[in-house]
Amino acid sequence: MEPLDLEETKEHPPKLGRKRDHTRDPEILQAALDVLAETGYDGMTVDLVAARARAGKATLYRRWPSKAELVVDAVACMKSKDLDLNALPDTGTLRGDLVAMIKTPTMAEAERKLHVMAGLVSMIARAPEMQEAVHAAIVEPRAQANRVLIRRAIERGEVAPDIDIEMVSMVAPAMAAYRVLVIRKPVTREFLLSVIDGVVLPAATGTPAALAAHA
């Protein structure tokens, strides 16, 4: 038997234990959202989430070292279900695409999302270092979709190629996040239409709001 190379062992320590199983992550993240909506961030505990998901607490801590990280991943998962970058609307106009992106939730869904987002406010107050992660989970998915739609509008000649794509793509998701997280109001279809027609289209096309709404 060859002697054990201690230096190599230090540089490449053997991997112990079984490979982590992530197949239950969606169930755990859904349980985290349910508990967050019911108890708020302050009342939420990893024990409660583990019990709701019927998973071991140690399993959750190995995957998410802190409650804040669990919450951010859960919210990111919730947002990712709302958007599929490979199946974005293509109506032929920027306004048509943006309007087609609006999905009107049921009252129960809207109320639940409001409670979830309210929990994030409390989390950020206690863990300000998570603010960037919250931004990535809440604002960035919709902004990314908007970038695709705006670039498509540029290719059609509908929007000038020199517009600030980054700024325009962030307007609606940032306003929606402010509405939910700060003033605690739901994001309705009427609200989103007013943002599209009154802010996004005029900024993207340089057209007055009244004309942009009928473009």
Image: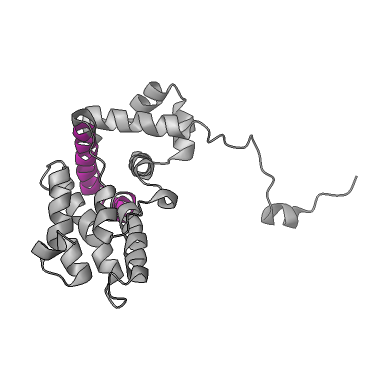
Quadrant the C terminus occupies: bottom left
Residue 136 highlighted magenta (yes or no):
yes
Relative to 3, is 16 above or below?
above
* Bounds of the magenta segment: 110-137
Provide the major secondary structure of the magenta segment: helix
Give the number of callouts: 0
Quadrant assignment, res 186: top left
Residue 122 belongs to magenta span: yes
Position of the N terminus by quadrant: top right
**Residue 154, relative to residue 14: is it above or below?**
below
72 or 2: nearer the eye?
Answer: 72
Q: Nearer the viewer, residue 180 or 86?
A: 86
Taking 133 as reference, is 15 left or right?
right
| Residue plotted at (44% across, 33% down) | 26
Residue at screen point 26% across, 54% down: 96
Left or right of 21: which side holds 9?
right
Q: Residue at x 26, y 41 (%)?
A: 103
Give x and y (percent) for residue 126.
23, 46
Horizontal and vertical percent position of residue 98: 26, 54
Return the x and y of residue 112 as percentages of the image width and height: 23, 32
Q: Is residue 183 visible?
A: yes
Q: Does any portion of residue 46 appear in the rendered image?
A: no
Coloration mode: one colour
The residue under the point 44% across, 36% down is 61
User: Residue 42's spot in the image, x, y percent?
Assistant: 22, 34
* Quadrant in the picture for residue 203: bottom left
